[in-house]
Image (tube, rainbow, N blue to C red):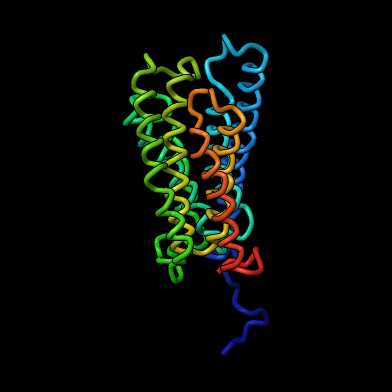
């Protein structure tokens, strides 16, 4: 019997190597989508608001709907993607939040009869599929969360009816806004559909925080921030189309602040990921 002087060679490029490649691809794509929504929506919002300040009479949109567009795209969708760049296993709710935002955009585009939000929402839902397929905790994406937070559930239920009413009003404006097209040439009607999507997304993302999937603090802060943005801009510019009536605007800001305050009491320290 001949004994080899060298131990048998093992394949160093097996499953562990494939996992590493998948993780790199996942992180890179999460970064691309995050930058696209956070930087892209921030830049576009800055541009449209500047155009309105320069000449409100010729601007197709106004700061209320533009900042609502920012809250949906950069805060809810982009923020959800950004949470996947580091420790995605602990931030499952972030990806769920981004999907909810894109679903709301797609549905609002369909009901509002707007081509660009519909096509954009569907396209980015398809672009999100690789993140779902490559997610390090893919099986947990569809798992139930921890025990439901009753205070957050009560606040979410409180917001559901007025948010739905606002969404219906915005969708009516979207359908009456005239032709629908691409590349921002029909931005007025598109913004109304996007505001409807924002209202629905705040409620559904709040519901996601309520059921407390892993990383539930991400949708908590996102829903609260989006509500405060809409309420504050409505208070500052009450005469613009898309603005909430003043009592509702004040209550929306109060709701957002209350939502985050309740969450902080429920989960000290803030950065825990239970």
Q: Position of residue 117 (x, y in %)?
A: 42, 29
Q: Going by the picture, which residue comes out furthest to the bottom? A: 1
In front: 267, or 123? 267
At 44% across and 71% down in the image, what residue appears? 147
Residue 126 horizontal side relative to residue 87, left or right: left
Quarter of the image where one finds residue 2: bottom right
Q: Is residue 210 visible?
A: yes
Q: Is residue 22 visible?
A: no
Q: Give the quadrant of the N terminus.
A: bottom right
Q: Position of residue 59 (x, y in %)?
A: 57, 14
In front: 149, or 8? 149
At 56% across and 22% down in the image, what residue appears? 62
Q: Position of residue 224 (x, y in %)?
A: 56, 49
In front: 175, or 127? 175
Q: Is residue 248 above or below residue 215?
A: above
Q: Is residue 81 above or below residue 42?
A: below
Q: Is residue 97 above or below residue 248?
A: below
In front: 133, or 264? 264
At 56% across and 62% down in the image, what residue appears? 262
Q: Position of residue 105 (x, y in %)?
A: 42, 36
Q: Is residue 134 above or below residue 235?
A: below
**Count of labels in the image:** 0
At 37% across and 14% down in the image, what residue appears? 178
Q: Give the quadrant of the C terminus.
A: bottom right
Quarter of the image where one finds residue 272: bottom right
């Amino acid at each position: 019997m001949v004994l080899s002087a060298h131990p048998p060679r093992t394949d160093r490029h097996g499953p562990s190597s494939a996992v590493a490649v998948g993780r790199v691809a996942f992180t890179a794509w999460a970064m691309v989508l995050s930058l696209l929504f956070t930087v892209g929506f921030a830049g576009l919002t800055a541009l449209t608001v500047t155009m309105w300040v320069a000449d409100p009479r010729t601007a197709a949109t106004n700061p209320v709907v533009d900042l609502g567009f920012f809250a949906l795209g950069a805060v809810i969708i982009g923020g959800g993607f950004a949470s996947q760049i580091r420790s995605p296993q602990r931030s499952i709710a972030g990806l769920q939040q981004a999907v909810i935002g894109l679903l709301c955009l797609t549905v609002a585009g369909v009901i509002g009869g707007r081509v660009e939000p519909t096509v954009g929402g569907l396209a980015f839902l398809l672009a999100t599929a690789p993140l779902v397929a490559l997610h390090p905790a893919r099986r947990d994406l569809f798992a139930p969360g921890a025990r439901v937070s009753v205070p957050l559930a009560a606040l979410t239920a409180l917001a559901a009816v007025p948010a739905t009413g606002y969404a219906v009003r915005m969708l009516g404006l979207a359908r009456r806004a005239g032709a629908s097209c691409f590349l921002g040439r029909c931005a007025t009607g598109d913004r109304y559909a996007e505001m409807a999507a924002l209202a629905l997304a705040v409620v559904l993302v709040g519901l996601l925080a309520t059921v407390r999937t892993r990383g539930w603090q991400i949708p908590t802060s996102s829903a609260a921030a989006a509500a405060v943005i809409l309420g504050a801009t409505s208070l500052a510019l009450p005469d613009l189309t898309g603005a909430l009536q003043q009592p509702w605007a004040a209550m929306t800001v109060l709701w957002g602040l209350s939502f985050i305050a309740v969450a902080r009491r429920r989960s000290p320290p803030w950065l825990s990921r239970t």
